[in-house]
C-alpha cells in the first residue's frame, strides 16, 4: 500500500509544472543589429511549424532592425503536434496545443499573413498565395509535410490521419462512436469488429497512440458500459519494417516493445498494407485484419509547394540543401524540417523529419539570416541530438539522454516536464497541466461532441 501511495503521489506531482515553466521565459534585451544597404530586406518565413517558429525566435534574439519579417501560414496558430495523439485519445483539449500566432509575431516583431501558399517563383523571388504575390529577398521554406498513403486511394478514403486538430478530433469521435455501437451490437462478430482498432505505422506517433488508446479504452470507457463487461479491445499495430520505432536505439525499441506487449497490443511487423475491403485491411500477403477504426501514421510526403520547385531533391522528394541549409541553385532560399534533405555530419544518414530536428535547423537558419543581413560569415549547421523520448501510456515512457537509456516512471516524468517546457505560452502550458491532472484523477474527455 505504501509503495502504491508513493507511486500515485509521484504521478500527481508529475502533472504539476515548475513555476519556471509557467512563467513567461525572460530574455535579455538583445543587441540591435542593422541590415546593410538603403532598402530594408524582406524576409519571408513560409510555415509556422516548429522550424518556422524557431527561425523567428532566432531573429528576435538577434535584434534585427534592418529587415521586414513576414510569417505566412494557412492557420492563425502554431500547433504543438507531439500532443495531437492525446487530443485523439481524450487526454488534452485541442485549444491547449494551438497557440495564436499574432501575439507571438508582435513580440518578434514580425508581420503575419494568414493565407494558403500556392507556389514559389525562385526567379522572380515571389511567393504565390491566396492573398496575392509576396516579394522576398530571403525565403525560408518550413512548410511541413502531408500524410503519405503511397498511392492507395481507397486506404486514404477509409483511414483517419493524425496531422491536424480536426483529424485528431475525428479519431476521438470514431473511437467513442465505435464503443457506443459495440454496446448495442447484435452479434459477437460485430462487437469484435467495432472494438478492433488498427494503427498503421509503428514510428513514434503510432507507438504513443496505441499505448494511450489502450488506457482510454480499458480505464476510461469500457468500465462504464455494462453490456461490454468482459470484452477485450483489440488494438493492432501494423508496421511494414521488421521493428517498431525504426531509427531509434535498440535499447529504446526494447523498452517500448516490452511495454506494448504487456498492454496486450497486437504488433504485426513485416506487414505491408495493400488496401481495404469490406471493413478490413488487406495486407500484401493476402491476410485481412477486420477493424472498424483504421488510423494511418505510416509515412509522410513533401508539401506540394516544396515538391513543385525545380531544384535538386532526394529520392523521397525532400530538397537537397548545402551545409548552411540553403538551396544551392537559389542561395537566398533556405529549406528545413520536412522540406529539407540534411545528412548527419557523422553518419551521413538523413536526419529524421521530426520536431527536434526542425527546431535546431530553424534556429540555425535564423542565426545565419541575421549574419547575412549584418555582413557576417555564415556558420554550417551541425545537428547534436538532445536525446529521444517516447511516451508509453500512464506512468511509462522510454528515454535516451546521452548514452543512458531508461524507462518506466522516471522516463515518463522526464517526458512530461520536457514537453511542457516546449509548449508555447503560459496559458497553454497551464491548460495541458490541468488536462493531465484531470485525466489522471478523474477521466478523459469522453463526450462525443462531433455528432
Image (cartoon, rainbow, N blue to C red):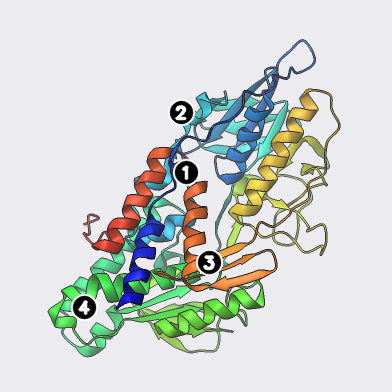
Q: How many marks?
A: 4
Q: Please tell me which residue is depicted at 51% across the width and 32% down the height of the picture.
A: 130
Tell me the distance, in whole angstroms, between the alpha carbons under discs 2 and 3.
Answer: 31 Å
Q: Residues within 10 Å of mark 3 (few under 14, many from 20)?
A: many
The numbered mark at residue 390 is 3
Q: CA distance from mark 4 to mark 2?
A: 45 Å
Position of residue 148 in the picture relative to residue 276 (left or right)? right
Residue matched to label 4:
182
Residue placed under numbered mark 1 in the picture:
21
Pointer 2 residue: 103
Q: Residue furthest right?
A: 377
Residue 258 position in % (x across, y down): 51, 83
Question: Which mark's residue is nearer the viewer, 4 or 1?
Answer: 1
Q: Residue at x 47, y 65 (%)?
A: 412
Query: SS for tag 4?
Result: helix
Report which quarter residue 225 is drawn in: bottom left
Which mark is in front, 2 or 3?
3
Cα–Cα gap, marks 1 and 3: 21 Å
| Image location of residue 8, percent across then percent down | 33, 68
Identify the element where label 1 is drawn: helix
Earlier in the chain: of badge 4 and badge 2, it is: 2
Q: Secondary structure at mark 3?
A: strand
Q: How far, Cα to Cα, is label 4 from label 1?
A: 42 Å
* Residue 164 visible, this orientation: yes
Q: Quadrant of the N terminus?
A: bottom left
Any part of residue 240 in sight: no
Which residue is more in the foreground, 23 or 101?
23
Judge depth for marks 2 and 1 and give the one in front.
Answer: 1
Q: Are marks 1 and 3 in contact (CB under 8 Å)?
A: no
x, y (%) of residue 345? 82, 57
Residue 346 tag number: none
Residue appearing at x 79%, y 22% in the figure: 374
Amino acid at each position: 500500500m505504501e509503495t502504491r501511495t508513493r507511486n500515485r503521489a509521484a504521478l500527481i506531482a508529475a502533472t504539476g509544472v515548475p513555476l519556471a515553466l509557467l512563467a513567461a521565459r525572460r530574455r535579455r534585451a538583445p543587441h540591435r543589429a542593422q541590415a546593410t544597404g538603403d532598402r530594408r530586406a524582406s524576409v519571408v518565413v513560409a510555415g509556422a511549424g516548429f522550424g518556422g517558429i524557431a527561425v523567428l525566435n532566432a531573429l528576435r534574439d538577434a535584434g534585427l532592425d534592418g529587415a521586414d519579417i513576414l510569417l505566412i501560414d494557412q492557420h492563425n496558430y502554431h500547433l504543438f503536434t507531439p500532443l495531437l495523439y492525446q487530443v485523439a485519445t481524450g487526454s488534452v483539449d485541442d485549444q491547449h496545443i494551438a497557440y495564436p500566432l499574432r501575439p507571438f509575431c508582435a513580440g518578434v516583431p514580425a508581420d503575419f499573413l494568414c493565407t494558403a501558399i500556392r507556389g514559389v517563383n525562385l526567379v522572380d523571388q515571389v511567393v504565390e498565395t491566396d492573398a496575392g504575390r509576396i516579394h522576398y529577398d530571403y525565403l525560408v521554406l518550413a512548410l511541413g509535410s502531408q500524410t503519405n498513403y503511397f498511392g492507395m486511394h481507397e486506404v486514404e478514403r477509409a483511414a483517419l490521419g493524425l496531422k491536424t486538430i480536426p483529424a485528431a478530433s475525428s479519431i476521438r469521435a470514431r473511437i467513442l462512436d465505435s464503443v457506443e455501437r459495440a454496446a448495442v451490437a447484435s452479434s459477437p462478430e460485430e462487437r469484435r469488429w467495432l472494438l478492433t482498432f488498427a494503427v498503421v505505422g509503428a514510428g513514434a506517433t503510432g507507438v504513443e497512440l496505441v499505448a494511450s488508446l489502450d488506457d482510454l479504452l480499458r480505464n476510461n470507457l469500457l468500465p462504464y458500459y455494462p453490456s461490454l463487461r468482459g470484452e477485450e479491445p483489440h488494438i493492432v499495430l501494423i508496421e511494414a519494417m521488421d521493428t517498431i520505432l525504426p531509427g531509434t536505439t535498440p535499447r529504446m525499441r526494447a523498452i517500448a516493445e516490452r511495454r506494448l506487449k504487456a498492454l496486450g497490443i497486437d504488433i504485426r511487423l513485416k506487414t505491408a498494407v495493400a488496401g481495404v475491403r469490406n471493413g478490413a485491411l488487406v495486407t500484401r500477403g493476402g491476410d485481412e485484419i477486420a477493424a472498424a477504426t483504421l488510423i494511418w501514421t505510416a509515412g509522410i510526403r513533401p508539401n506540394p509547394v516544396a515538391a513543385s520547385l525545380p531544384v535538386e531533391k532526394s529520392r523521397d522528394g525532400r530538397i537537397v540543401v548545402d551545409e548552411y541549409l540553403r538551396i544551392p541553385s537559389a542561395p537566398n532560399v533556405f529549406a528545413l524540417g520536412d522540406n529539407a534533405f540534411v545528412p548527419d555530419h557523422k553518419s551521413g544518414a538523413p536526419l529524421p523529419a521530426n520536431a527536434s530536428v526542425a527546431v535546431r535547423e530553424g534556429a540555425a537558419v535564423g542565426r545565419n539570416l541575421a549574419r547575412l543581413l549584418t555582413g557576417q560569415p555564415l556558420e554550417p549547421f551541425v545537428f547534436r541530438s538532445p536525446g529521444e523520448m517516447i511516451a508509453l501510456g500512464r506512468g511509462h515512457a522510454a528515454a535516451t539522454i546521452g548514452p543512458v537509456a531508461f524507462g518506466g516512471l522516471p522516463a515518463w516524468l522526464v517526458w512530461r516536464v520536457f514537453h511542457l517546457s516546449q509548449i508555447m505560452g503560459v496559458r497553454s502550458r497551464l491548460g495541458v497541466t490541468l488536462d493531465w491532472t484531470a485525466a489522471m484523477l478523474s477521466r478523459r474527455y469522453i463526450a462525443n461532441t462531433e455528432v
